Image: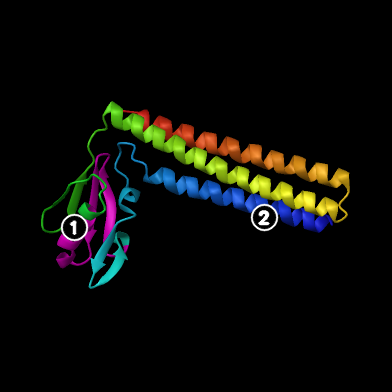
Amino acid sequence: MDEEVEFILDVAKEKMQQAILHLEKAMVKIRAGKANPSMVSGVFVDYYGVNTPLIQVANVGTSDARTIVIQPWEKNMIIPIEKAIMAANLGFNPDNNGELIRINIPMLTEDRRATFVKQARHEGEECKISIRSSRRETMEELKKMKKDGLSEDMEKTAEEKVQKLTDKFYSKVDELVAVKEKDIMTI
């Protein structure tokens, strides 16, 4: 029985870690006013008829805090990359000089900052919902195991461990959201 309880706790922890990983990926995509190559990570380019991620057809980097630089590996890919960036509807206006593409990241207005903060908080709340869902599933499993012969003491101990895990991951979510908020609001 002990091994089954440990297994259930490990599964819960893994699900909660997946929720945190998803949140971290979502936070990277929220703009903070600084240029970051990950801002264009969701852009797919038509590469000879195949929908290909931008990072597989070009070098993506930053030249300064406000500029993303994209250097295609093939010069004939400049126009398709520009079209893909425009089609991705990221709010960027790419500029090419024949060899590379520059994207100037505009300063964020106070309204845009507030919108991005709301978006970050929303992502944090979605993550918390996922964590609560994992907690609920684990608690249900423990109740089933109690019916199948798990001692009450073991069940209570396992429930306490699940709650501690939940609290730990909740604080991690709050920390990630606070860091992103600070990043967005920093001018």
Of the 4 image quadrants, the one containing the N terminus is: bottom right
Image coordinates of residue 176 in percent, x first then y, are: 49, 37
What residue did someone put label 1 on? Answer: 83
Label 2 packing within 10 angstroms: few (<14), some (14-19), many (20+)? some
Is the residue 116 above or below the residue 90 in the image?
above
Residue 75 inside the magenta-drawn segment: yes
Q: Amino acid at mark 2?
A: Val
Q: Amino acid at mark 1?
A: Lys
Q: Quadrant of residue 182?
A: top left
Image coordinates of residue 73 in percent, x first then y, are: 23, 65
Image coordinates of residue 74 in percent, x first then y, are: 19, 67
Residue 4 is left or right of residue 187, and the answer is right
Image coordinates of residue 141 in percent, x first then y, are: 74, 52
| Residue that appears at 70% across and 49% down | 138
**Considering the numbered disc 2 on the image, is that residue within a helix, a strand or a loop?**
helix
Residue 98 is left or right of residue 2, and the answer is left
Residue 18 inside the magenta-drawn segment: no
Nearer to the camera, 77 or 123: 123
* Earlier residue among tags 2 and 1: 2
Q: Where are the magenta residues, as a range?
A: 56-85
Residue 136 is left or right of residue 65, and the answer is right
